[in-house]
Image: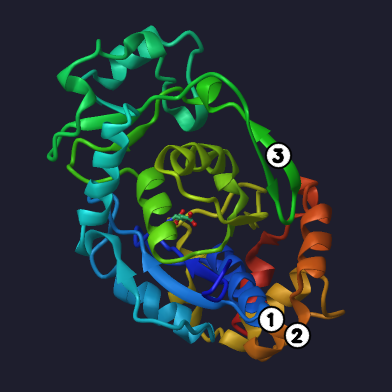
Amino acid sequence: MQTSPATTRLAPSPTGDLHLGHARTFLLTAALARSQGWRILLRLEDLDRHRVVAGASERTVEMLAWLGIDWDAPPTRQRDDLRPFEDAMRRLADAGWIFACTLSRREIREAASAPHGHEGEPRFDPRLRPPPGDSWRFARGDQSHRLRVEPGEVAFVDQLLGARRFDPSAECGDFAVWTREGVPSYQLAVVVDDARQGVTDVVRGDDLLASTARQILLQRALGLSPPRWWHLPLVADAAGARLAKRHGSTSLESLRATGATAERISGLVAWWCRWIPERAPLDPRTLRELVTPESLRALVAREQDPAARPRVDEETLRWLRDA
Ligand code: GLU
């Protein structure tokens, strides 16, 4: 029986400045949460030391508040306490799920039967696993560890996209759960934190759909029940490519500095979603009345066609600045 309220989380990585694509995903997530009576948590995913940018956590929190988003507990930072992740690693090791891996990326690539797996990461072939023994224990520290992935598809139902299936054993093979830098990988960190923070509803960009199957494997190995999944399409740039954090002109900070208001961003998002007939400033709280599971499903169905996904071009930026 569920005793605590439904909960979602905003999980930005402080690896650069938030842009209009983040604004859409986070505004829709927060509006859905409020319309459904869910709690909202804010979690800064700051484990990747090489990608985290100094000051980006603070700026991210500030920009989310500026957008009119609120949350129900002080923001957490994953790096502040690694113990829950280490505990999970010990549980995985006790059940024979993980092994230490000292192979280089090149060695893994050379052994891969497919030229490369998902997202440029070489697929880790099961024949590269170490023999039974010490390597199948968790040595806290800077040795990378991988999860044993058995052949077979992972099926799940996305609340917006419907039934989906992926085959992690074919896409990525045994994937990293602990990195050489001595911190959990994204996949492990997100699974452990979603569980311990009581997250019941994960709303995020659909670039993470394939990761969902990997996270389900980890949840099964750890005996955790999966949350509900809601994957939203991403916004593109003028050329139709995914917006990146390096696209300075679409960063929320540079937009704010050049005259954009949070009301204009909320209005743009509602217009992109075709919930208002014309592009016009909108109180961020009004978004809550427009966002329902059904209105999001209609949006997601339409935007399965990449040509229907909104694009951020110069004209959009000028309108936001009222220039
Ligand atoms: N921190 C991840 C990102 O910024 C999102 C994680 C998630 O929502 O599961 O891409």
Q: Residue 316 carries which label?
A: none
Label 3 Cα neighbours within 10 Å, binned few <14 / some 14-19 / many ≥20: some
Local SS, label 2: helix
Q: Residue 289 carries which label?
A: 2
Q: Is residue 258 visible?
A: no
Q: Quadrant of the C terminus?
A: bottom right
The residue carrying pointer 2 sits among few (fewer than 14), some (14 to 19) or many (20 or more) residues within 10 Å by Cα, namely: few
Which residue is at a point 57% across and 72% down the rendered structure image?
6
Which amino acid type is shown beneath numbered disc 3? Arg
Helix, strand or loop at label 1? It is helix
Considering every residue shown, the one lying at the far front of the view is 1
Residue 164's label in the rendered image is 3
Q: How many numbered marks, from 0 up?
A: 3
Front residue of 134 and 111: 134
Q: What residue type is labelled 1?
A: Ser
Label 3 – label 2 distance at C-alpha: 29 Å
Q: Which amino acid does label 2 sit on?
A: Glu
Give the left or right position of residue 207, taking residue 289 as reference.
left
Please report the residue visible at 39 percent of the width from the left and 73 percent of the height from the top: 60
**C-alpha separation, residue under disc 3 versus residue under disc 1:** 26 Å
Point out residue 207 in the picture as x, y percentages from the top left corner: 57, 46
Q: Does the residue labelled 2 lie within 8 Å of ligand 1?
A: no
Q: Mark 1 points at which residue?
A: 35
Q: How far apart are marks 1 and 2 (CA)?
A: 7 Å
Q: Is mark 3 on a helix, strand or loop?
A: strand
Identify the mark nearer the N-term, 1 or 2.
1
Front of the two marks 1 and 2: 1
User: Is residue 164 shown to the viewer in this render?
Assistant: yes
In the rendered view, would you say 309 is above or below 278? above
Residue 217's spot in the image, x, y percent?
49, 36
Q: Which of marks 3 and 2 is in front?
A: 3
Q: Mark 1 near mark 2, Cβ–Cβ under 8 Å?
A: yes
